[in-house]
Image (cartoon, helix red, strand yellow):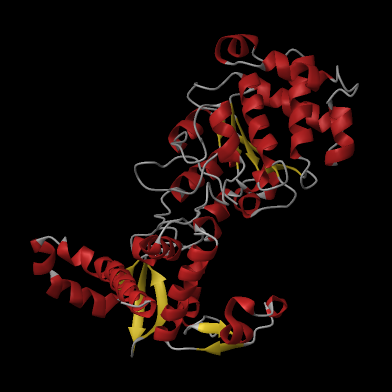
């Protein structure tokens, strides 16, 4: 058998296995369908024709209207009390003219493959090819790269996906490449890339994807809620899976408590958010920090807590390690610059007295810090996540009914109903 025969045989096996992934994804659910679900199919069809096809999206469950094979309208699932307005754009998301409908290959690469002029990348000169041609090219390039450079030259990248495991494009790509051989994967993710690296070394767990303080506890025990780079109202519209939006029931309770003066909300954010608008701008204390100066603000808060003897010495002594190593930097013993409110004012754009008052308020009341993921997506973002924990530890309220620290995502399922923050 010559080399070409070897290639053809291995290509057939590769495509057969690749097709098997697709078939398994399509047949898997039907093989596991309970008998009672099958028996109810007639009734289900009636519901579909009357109300639309029930399906899920990143923005919630919907009823989809399909006419002549085309997704023409989406309306909220009738049990979703707080549907997102974004579902109205789903039909356009499916049928948008900008979507790539067929395999396309850059012109010069089609001619010369890996010897092509790479300066042409991005000039949008592409040629449509058949699916068979595209699969041949894909396989041939896997062969070339593996044989020439080895698995370290093949990257299985991560990425976004449509709701549901079958629509996991990055997962399917990883499986396809794995059928051929080894490759380089990715570690972590872009959502919490900095925080998830530092926090296991600070609090012992990744934290960003852990169970969070439940909203009933927050509402019952908080006197002050600090939203640090977190827009609750906007964030909970979307989810990696399909959100139920039940958490908005607690937002309504929060709004009532804020209006009644039972809870004060402070938002540390360069911009006015949709949460400000929802709770009422007059009810939210907005501290407009200059972008990417959050760590100086955190340091100044810590300096105020320490210099005014507002920090919890017992908590630091009994539950923390390393505060004595952090303190010389905070006080400027080595660089001659105390990280106080006056120093931070020049960087953050927040006057020193506002910083001091914030530190005093956080120490005087049961305070919940809800920290969004967006702030750690800056250069040295791990320092911000680390300093959030330092502040929480200095306040000494970790472990009480309000945990004081939240660094988490968007899950709003009934079983979790935790405080969440994202973007």
Q: Is residue 277 left or right of residue 63?
A: right
Image location of residue 340, percent across then percent down: 84, 25
Determine if residue 260 is in view. no
- Left or right for 415, reference 133: left
With respect to residue 145, does 108 lie above or below? below
* Residue 125 x, y percent position in the rendering: 64, 87
User: Dividing the picture into quarters, in which one does residue 228 lie?
Assistant: top right
Q: Residue at x 65, y 43 (%)?
A: 376
Residue at 54% in and 50% down:
189
Confirm whether residue 182 shows in the render.
yes
- Estimate the x, y position of residue 234 in percent, counting from the top left: 57, 55
In the depicted view, which residue is nearer to us: 346 or 108? 108
User: As displayed, is residue 252 above or below residue 296?
Assistant: below
Location of residue 303 by image quarter = top right
Question: In which quadrant of the rendered image does the N terminus lie?
Answer: bottom left
Residue 29: give x, y in percent of width and height.
Answer: 22, 64
**74 left or right, relative to 321:** left
Asked if residue 120 lies left or right of residue 290, the reply is left
Q: Residue furthest front?
A: 1
Which one is in front, 306 or 168? 168
Q: Residue 342 occupies which quadrant of the picture?
A: top right
For the image shown, how many numbered marks are present on the structure? Answer: 0
Q: Residue at x 42, y 80 (%)?
A: 136
């Amino acid at each position: 058998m010559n080399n070409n025969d070897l290639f053809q045989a291995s290509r057939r096996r590769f495509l057969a296995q690749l097709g098997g992934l697709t078939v398994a994804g399509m047949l898997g659910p039907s093989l596991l369908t309970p008998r009672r679900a099958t028996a109810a199919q007639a009734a289900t069809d009636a519901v579909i024709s009357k109300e639309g096809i029930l399906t899920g999206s990143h923005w919630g469950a919907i009823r989809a209207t399909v006419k002549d094979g085309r997704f023409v309208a989406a309306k909220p699932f009738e049990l979703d009390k707080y549907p997102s307005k974004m579902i109205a754009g789903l039909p356009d998301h499916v049928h948008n003219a900008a979507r790539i409908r067929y395999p396309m290959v850059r012109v010069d690469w089609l001619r010369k493959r890996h010897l092509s002029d790479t300066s042409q990348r991005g000039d949008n000169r592409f040629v449509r090819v058949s699916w068979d041609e595209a699969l041949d090219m894909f396989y041939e390039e896997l062969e070339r790269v593996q044989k020439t450079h080895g698995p370290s030259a093949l990257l299985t990248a991560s990425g976004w996906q449509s709701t549901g495991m079958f629509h996991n494009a990055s997962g399917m790509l990883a499986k396809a490449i794995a059928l051929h051989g080894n490759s380089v994967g990715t570690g972590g993710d872009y959502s919490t890339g900095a925080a998830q690296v530092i926090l296991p070394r600070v609090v012992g767990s990744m934290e960003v994807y852990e169970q969070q303080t439940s909203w009933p506890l927050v509402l019952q025990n908080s006197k002050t809620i600090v939203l640090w780079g977190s827009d609750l109202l906007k964030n909970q519209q979307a989810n990696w899976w399909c959100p139920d939006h039940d958490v908005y029931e607690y937002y309504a309770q929060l709004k009532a408590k804020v209006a009644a003066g039972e809870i004060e909300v402070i938002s540390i954010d360069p911009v006015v958010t949709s949460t400000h608008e929802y709770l009422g701008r007059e009810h939210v204390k907005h501290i407009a920090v200059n972008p990417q100066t959050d760590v100086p603000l955190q340091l100044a808060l810590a300096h105020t807590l320490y210099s005014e003897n507002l920090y919890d010495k017992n908590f630091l002594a009994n539950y923390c390690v390393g505060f004595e190593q952090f303190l010389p930097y905070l006080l400027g013993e080595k660089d001659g610059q105390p990280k106080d409110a006056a120093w931070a004012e020049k960087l953050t754009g927040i006057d020193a007295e506002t910083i001091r008052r914030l530190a005093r308020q956080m120490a005087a009341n049961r305070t919940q810090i809800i920290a969004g993921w967006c702030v750690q997506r800056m250069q040295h973002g791990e320092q911000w996540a680390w300093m959030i924990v330092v502040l929480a530890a200095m306040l000494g309220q970790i472990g009480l009914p309000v945990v004081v620290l939240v660094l988490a995502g968007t899950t709003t399922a009934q079983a979790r109903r935790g405080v969440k923050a994202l973007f």
